[in-house]
Amino acid sequence: MKNKRTIGIALWFSFFIYLGIVVYLVFFAESLGRGGSWAQTTDVSLNVNLVPFNEIKRFVSFLGDTTYGSMAIINLAGNIVLFMPMGFLMPCVFRKFGFLQTVVLSCILSFVIESVQLYTKLGSFDVDDIILNTIGAIIGFLLFVILRPLK
């Protein structure tokens, strides 16, 4: 019984550490262009993409480019990898969470992050980031399902 409690505490601790890392990377990591001026642009339309797959297609077209290829990989893979732990940890921490709850809550969290980025001008609101983050959460949940029998 004590071992289950210790594991539960460790999972919650891991979840909060993960959330802290997400907040840092999304809002404050200078290496990712964050934490600078709050006034990137006064034209909000430049910081919004509401067309699904628009930016994903653009970044995929850059993959072979020597100048922008690495930026495209970082954007596409980074958004997916960033939310994989969310999809894995959520059903560990919230034991009654299934696939649907994990995916919906991850999507909502991603939407909130994108909205805060737009409001604070520490990024942009990009529906494609929400799509990629949700894909990451789905992959994380699938890893949880695969690894769950090993506990």
Image (cartoon, rainbow, N blue to C red):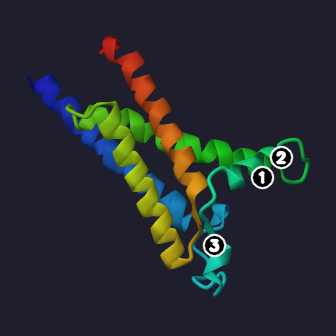
Q: Position of residue 88 (x, y in %)?
A: 39, 33
Residue drawn at point x = 46 percent, y = 34 percent: 138
Residue drawn at point x = 67 percent, y = 45 percent: 76
Which residue matches tag 3? Answer: 47
The image quadrant where one finds the N terminus is top left
Classify mark 2: residues with Cα within 10 Å, few (<14), some (14-19) or many (20+).
few
Distance from Cα at disc 1 to Cα at disc 3: 16 Å
The quarter of the displayed image where residue 112 is located: bottom left
Vertical placement of 109 versus 2: above or below?
below
Distance from Cα at disc 1 to Cα at disc 2: 5 Å
Which residue matches tag 2? Answer: 61
Vertical placement of 97 versus 16: above or below?
above
Please report whichever mark, 1 or 3, sits nearer to the chain's N-terminal start: 3
Q: For the residue marked with disc 1, what is the amino acid?
A: Arg
Classify mark 1: residues with Cα within 10 Å, few (<14), some (14-19) or many (20+).
few
Please report whichever mark, 2 or 3, sits nearer to the chain's N-terminal start: 3
Q: Is residue 107 left or right of residue 136?
A: left
Q: Is residue 5 left or right of residue 67?
A: left
Which residue matches tag 1? Answer: 58
| CB-based contact (under 8 Å), mark 1 and mark 3 | no
Q: Considering the numbered disc 1 on the image, is that residue within a helix, a strand or a loop?
A: helix
Q: Position of residue 32 (x, y in %)?
A: 65, 61
Q: For the residue marked with disc 2, what is the amino acid?
A: Ser
